[in-house]
Amino acid sequence: MAIPTVDFWFEFASTYSYPTAIRIAPLARAAGVAVRWRPFMLGPIFKAQGWTTSPFNLYPAKGRNMWRDLERICLDLGLPFLRPELFPQNALQAARVAVVALAESWGEDYCRAIYRSEFGEGRNLEEEGTIAGVLQKLGQDAKAVLQRARSDGVKSQLRAQTEEAQRLDIFGSPTFVTSDGELFWGNDRLEAALKWATR
Amino acid sequence: MAIPTVDFWFEFASTYSYPTAIRIAPLARAAGVAVRWRPFMLGPIFKAQGWTTSPFNLYPAKGRNMWRDLERICLDLGLPFLRPELFPQNALQAARVAVVALAESWGEDYCRAIYRSEFGEGRNLEEEGTIAGVLQKLGQDAKAVLQRARSDGVKSQLRAQTEEAQRLDIFGSPTFVTSDGELFWGNDRLEAALKWATR
């Protein structure tokens, strides 16, 4: 029998994807599920439904609750939390680097490190040095990786993944899609998605 | 020491409040937490942020996911689920009756029965007989209760609760507020709210 697989769709601007990125590997391992990390961009999807920024900024009460809720979740998990000044952050470059990284063995470590940097240390991914700093800490040649991330092949792969996300009816991050096409949205649905995959 | 208390704020139009209404009493009892059931109206709160209907109707992909997600949740809980044709339903009368009922011993049974009727049997709360039928099944004098629900005192109590919900920064249903003012939103945050209350 094939190993059950879950596609983990994520956008680096998404707050709740931070605890998911940290939680998913050990939980999936324990459940016997393989996870495919699929970065995509939420911007075009939000734009298509008339949003020009995060709904957490458009609806302030919802936003206030989200920040507090995320803080509580991180506290429960023993994860560092520091709200970044800038939200949402344009994570296009970070996502392109993820496309490069996920084709290699250090991809998941990179994704976790980006989320930790953004929401654990309150860093700004749009600043020149943030992504380079993460790459260096992972022992990568930052300049070379960033250059590959700017290639046409990588750009079009990320664009294609965003289009695939839209076709799958994905509207937020994190989203989990099982091999039989069941869609689960939200950090709080991770366990349900893994359970579904192993039915 | 005082018994920890959680206020359970709910609107009968809300889908995810159905599993919460069924789950909250046994979970709170096990946790040693007292629950105050606080009906309110989401309409004025949605209107204040520019919505004229449910966000699940405004954003179709989100709506499709919600109905499927609710169906899965009900399946897990062994709860009947039948999507009503009309959504969202104007639950003003049902909420006014809840104000009457919750002042008596059968209040929580009434609230659970309304949710079961709406999302377990797909009934329409706006139809004349639906609420009366629920009241009759509970052994109540439907005509007398409905008359009391139309009194000025009940109307203004529900209005005051809706205003209180707005002051508390509530933006959705179900919402849980602990006695130290911590706010939790969503059926999936029920356990966290009870845990917080007993810290």
Image: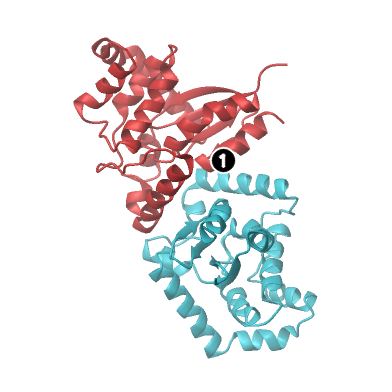
Chain colours: A cyan, B red
Q: Which residue is mark 1?
A: B189
**Residue at (44, 61) in percent of width and height:** A182
In percent of width and height, residue B14 lies at 39, 38
In percent of width and height, residue B74 lies at 43, 42
Residue type for callout 1: Arg
Give the farthest residue toward the front: A1
Residue B186 in view in this figure: no
Left or right: B141, with A46 as reference point: left
**Does A98 appear above or below A85?**
below
**Does A47 appear above or below B39?**
below
Residue A17 in view in this figure: yes
Question: Front-most of A41 and A87?
Answer: A41
In percent of width and height, residue A68 lies at 62, 44
Instruction: Count numbered badges in the picture.
Output: 1
**Residue at (73, 16) in percent of width and height:** B1
Query: In terms of secondary structure, where does tag 1 sit?
Result: helix
Left or right: B11, with A27 as reference point: left
Q: Quadrant of residue A83?
A: bottom right
Say few, some or many: other residues with alpha carbon within 10 Å of mark 1 (under 14 / 14 to 19 / 20 or more).
Answer: some
Question: Front-most of B36 and A53?
Answer: B36
Q: Quadrant of residue B31?
A: top right
Callout 1: chain = B
Check the picture and name the quadrant holding the N terminus of chain A.
bottom right
Q: Quadrant of residue A169?
A: bottom left
**Residue at (57, 64) in percent of width and height:** A13
**Does B51 appear above or below A17?**
above
Question: Front-most of A73 and A43?
Answer: A73
**Residue at (63, 62) in percent of width and height:** A28
